[in-house]
């Protein structure tokens, strides 16, 4: 066991790692990195909590939310 007694790690990942709509400004490709992180954790007997950190649409409606970006830049052009 590691000296720090670390036994798990949370890996936040957005839905865009797997599914991106044509109008979304995200990139994907995180799956390979997630698998690499899981492999590293297995090496050290550490559990991995995969956290869906971002779901489609807006979670809060604030400026840092993608929904506001969509409303101000994409929707008016539609």
Image: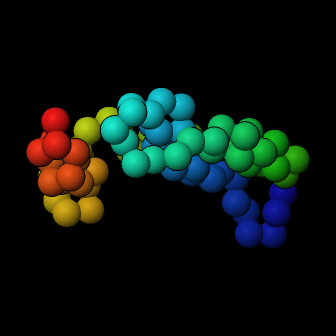
Q: Is residue 31 above or below residue 9?
A: above
Q: Quadrant of the C terminus?
A: top left
The residue positioned 87% from the left and 47% from the top of the image is: 43
Scheme by which the image is coloured: rainbow
Please name whichever residue, 74 or 52, is drawn nearer the observer in this view of the structure: 74
Of 40 and 7, the residue lying toward us: 40
Q: Is residue 1 above or below residue 57?
A: below
Q: Nearer the viewer, residue 3 or 25?
A: 25
Which of 71 and 65 lies nearest the eye of the viewer? Answer: 71
Q: Is residue 44 shown left or right of residue 30?
A: right
Residue at left 19%, top 63%? 63
Name the residue located 78 percent from the left edge and 45 percent from the top edge. Answer: 36
Percent position (x, y) of residue 25? 40, 48
Question: Of all residues shown, which one is farthest toward the front?
Answer: 77
Residue at 56 percent of width and 42 percent of height: 28
Q: Position of residue 53 (x, y in %)?
A: 42, 46
Q: Is residue 38 visible?
A: no
Q: Where is the N terminus found, in terms of image quarters?
A: bottom right
- Based on the displayed image, in which of its 4 quarters is residue 49 positioned? top right
Q: Position of residue 74 (x, y in %)?
A: 22, 45
Whether residue 62 is visible here, answered yes or no, is yes
Q: Position of residue 48 (x, y in %)?
A: 65, 43
Which residue sits furthest right?
A: 43
Q: Is residue 25 left or right of residue 7?
A: left
Does residue 65 appear left or right of residue 26 in this picture? Answer: left
């Amino acid at each position: 066991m590691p000296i720090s007694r670390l036994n798990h790690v949370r890996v936040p990942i957005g839905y865009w790692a797997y599914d991106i709509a044509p109008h979304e400004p995200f990139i994907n490709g995180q799956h390979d990195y997630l698998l690499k992180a899981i492999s590293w954790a297995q090496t050290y007997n550490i559990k991995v909590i995969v956290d869906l950190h971002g779901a489609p649409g807006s979670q809060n409606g604030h400026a840092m939310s993608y929904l506001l970006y969509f409303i101000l830049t994409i929707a008016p052009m539609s």
